[in-house]
Image (spheres, rainbow, N blue to C red):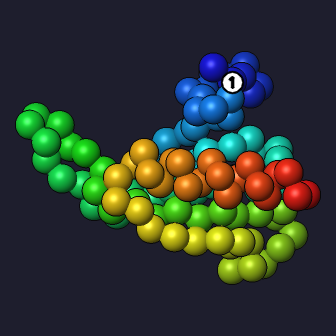
């Protein structure tokens, strides 16, 4: 688990994964980019609610950039795992090229 200012976070591929309602943030907020995943719809599988449609955005963390211009890449996937996979690829490439 990653630690930031005394708090522990769930990690995915070594980076923090934080959930707030239907929005998940993946990556370290101190890095130049993070991935924001928004669960747009869910479906029922047995007794569990499973993420169905998930929007994925690669965003810059620089607070001086206009919020609209912070969005670097955007997409949508069916299911949380494919969305996380896409987001992790985008984030890895963006951090590598920065």
Question: Residue drawn 69% across and 43% down?
Answer: 27
Residue at the image point whose x is 34% and y is 60% from the top: 78
Badge count: 1
Residue for point 58% across, 33% down: 12
Q: Judge from the rendering whether residue 57 lies leftward or rightward of residue 51; answer left or right.
A: right
Residue located 68% across and 29% down the image: 14
Q: Is residue 40 left or right of residue 58?
A: left
Q: Is residue 23 visible?
A: no
The quadrant of the rendering that contains the N terminus is: top right
Residue 71 vertical placement versus 22 (above, below)? below
Quadrant containing the C terminus in the rendered view: bottom right
Pick whichever, 62 or 45, lies toward us.
45
Q: Residue furthest left?
A: 46
Where is residue 26 drawn, in percent x and y?
A: 61, 45
Q: Residues within 10 Å of mark 1 (few under 14, many from 20)?
A: some
Residue at label 1? Answer: 2
**Residue 61 located left or right of residue 46:** right
Residue 17 rendering spot, x and y as whole percentages:
58, 37
Please say whether residue 85 is visible from this viewpoint: yes
Image vertical order of residue 83 relative to residue 77, above or below:
above
Q: Horizontally, is 63 left or right of 91 in the view?
A: right
Relative depth, front residue between 89 and 18:
89
Callout 1: SS: strand
Q: Position of residue 32 (x, y in %)?
A: 84, 55
């Amino acid at each position: 688990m990653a630690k930031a200012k005394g708090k522990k976070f769930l990690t995915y591929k070594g980076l923090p994964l934080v959930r707030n309602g239907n929005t998940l943030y993946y990556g370290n907020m101190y890095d130049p980019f993070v991935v924001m995943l928004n669960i747009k719809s869910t479906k029922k599988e047995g007794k569990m609610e499973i993420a169905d449609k998930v929007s994925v955005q690669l965003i810059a963390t620089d607070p001086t950039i206009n919020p609209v211009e912070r969005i670097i890449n955007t997409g949508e996937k069916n299911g949380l795992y494919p969305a996380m996979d896409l987001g992790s690829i985008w984030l890895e490439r963006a951090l590598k090229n920065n």
